Every structure is written in C-alpha cells, then in structure tokens.
Image (cartoon, rainbow, N blue to C red):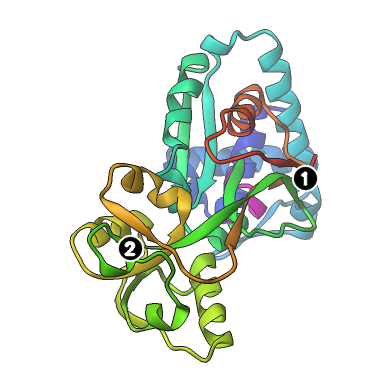
Amino acid sequence: MDVKNIITFLRVAELRSFTKAAEEMNYVQSTVTTQIQQLEKELGYPLFERTNRSVALTTFGEAYLPLARKMYQTTQEMYSLNTEAKEMTGTLRVGIVESLFFSDFLRLISLFQAQFPKVVLDFYTGSSVEIVDLIRQNKLDFGCCLAANPSGELLRMFSCPAPVVFVANKNHPLVQEKSVSLGAISHENFVLTEEISVYHQILLQMFARHDLEIKVNIRLKSTRGIVEILKYSDGISFLPEYAVRSEVEKGQLGIIRADIPRQEVSVVVTTRRDKWISPPMEVFLRLLREEKWLADWDQAY
C-alpha cells in the first residue's frame, strides 16, 4: 500500500475537498483523484461520497480513517529512527492564542530551530475554541489554549494558572492608586477583546456579580493591538499578566491594583489522545515545560 496514497486520503478527509488537498500538497487535482482511486481499488470499497459541491467520507471511509492515521504515524516513526534531528524534515502545526504567542513564548522558537532547522513551524493563532476544534480535526498537532477543558479524543498534557490584571497607560490616574475599587474601575472606558475570549468572560461575570456595567470604548480581536492602544490612550483593559509583562517592565503600562481577589485563567497544552508524539513535537513540548516561559506546569500525562 503506497504511503503517498494514504497521506493524500488523510488530507482530503481533513479538508473535505479534493481541490484544497491538491493545492495544499502542490498536486494537480487529477493526481489526487488518481491516488484516491488507487487506494479505493486496493481496499475494495469507496472512501468518499462525491457530489458537485462537497466531499464526505463513506461509512467505510470513516472506519478506515483511524487506521490510515496509525499507518502514517508508524511510517513517520520508522523514518525518524534513522534520521538525525538536524536532517529531519516535515511540518509541526501549532495552535496558540495570540496573547500567548506575543509573550516569552517567542524565544522558544529559536531554541527549537537550533535542534530542527529543517522542520517548518506552522503557527495558527485564534481563539481557544477554534484551536481545540482544529486539534479535533487533526489539522493541528497540538495547541496552547486558555481554560480549555479537553475531553473525549483530546488529551490535556499540562497546564498552569496565569493571573489576569487591569492595566492602563503608566500615566493613568488609577495606576498611581494603592487600591482601587471595582466600582471606580467601572467608570473607565475599556479596550477589550471579543466576548468569546476567556478573560473577557471573567470580566463580564465579575461585573455582573457586583451589578456593574462595562463601558466598552474600543473592541479589538488582537490582544497585541490592545496593548499598543493602551500606550497611547486613557483606556484600560483586563488582560493576562504575561501579555503585558514586557510593557510594564519597560514602564510603558502599569497595573491597576484592584481591590478584588486574584483572577486567573488556566493555560492548557492539549493534543489528540491518538496523536503520535514525533521527535520535533516532543522537543517543542519539552521546551514549553522546561523553559519557564510562563510558570511551573501541572503535569497531566
């Protein structure tokens, strides 16, 4: 059984499209069609139901999918046995929420590339919900999410708590105060992420418990963009401490010492339970655990 045909089957199954699979694999579409036909002839059953607008796995295709993944993983394992790290090729697909990406996480990239210079790092930044969904579809090898609670086919590998703080321009009057009530904070104009974000939800729930309303002045999906806006405005925000640590240390932003209990999000690293941990993936996970880019991790596997 030709491994190339199995790889093509996996890409079509994940993308639900012969055209997209051909584009991603740099094939003409007829090559993808031929490879799938060869595999179907060898197995004796159709793998996909084809219509003009969509491609779906047949019942047999659904049953064959996990076996195809195992066959591909076994092939990769055999390949890695005789390959030095510096000569190893391939792609490591990593999902990460943007606030984590623009933290000390960035320094891990050069550490990884020093060991695997020929492995392509393919990063996807999005919400925790989006990343978890892509891991389930096997479109990402693993993900770094906030407050993810994986179950079923997903495995929580390790996690750690991360404080969330009120933050503003260093010259904001509330930054100078020793203690600020939540009521006083509620009078300020907020620069916030979209409501789907974990820390936005924490803020909404906290204000609701105190019968307070949030005055949203600017809403922006990008956490990094919010940090930049705060440097040049009188707005305040509610963000993970790691996302603003560098700017606070440089004296560009300041933490507002709110008179409330410590607020936290949980940073979770997760993957599929049936995922083969390749040498590049193993090294990247080790860097995440050992390089102290966030804090001490709670081991989960």
CA separation in Å, label 2 and label 1: 45 Å
Q: Residue at x 73, y 33 (%)?
A: 276
The structure residue drawn at horizontal position 73% and vertical position 59%, both measured from the top left corner, is 58
Residue kind at label 2, given as amino acid type: Val
Q: Is the N terminus in the top left, top right, bottom left or bottom right quadrant? A: top right
Which residue has dot 1 on it?
273
Q: Nearer the viewer, residue 185 or 259?
A: 259
* Three-letter amino acid code at the position of disc 1: Arg
> Could you say which is closer to the camera, residue 243 or residue 62?
243
What secondary structure is found at the residue carrying circle 1?
Answer: loop
Tell me, yes or no, if residue 53 can be seen here.
Answer: no
Q: Earlier in the sequence, mark 2 or mark 1?
A: 2
Who's the residue at 67% across and 16% down the image?
Answer: 79
Q: Nearer the viewer, residue 131 or 64?
A: 131
| Residue 180 appears left or right of 39 | left
Vertical position of residue 272 compared to residue 149: above or below:
above
Q: Quadrant of residue 179?
A: bottom left
The nearer-to-camera label among 2 and 1 is 2
Q: Is residue 252 left or right of residue 238?
A: left
Compared with 207, 255 (above or below) is above
Boundaries of the magenta span: 134-140
Q: Which structural element holds mark 2?
A: helix
Cβ atoms under marks 2 and 1 closer than 8 Å = no
Where, by quadrant of the figure, is residue 75 drawn?
Answer: top right
Whole-percent x, y for residue 88 in the image: 55, 15
Residue 175: image tag:
2
Estimate how packed mark 2 is, as few (under 14), some (14 to 19) or many (20 or more) residues with alpha carbons within 10 Å. Answer: many
Q: Position of residue 293 (x, y in %)?
A: 52, 36
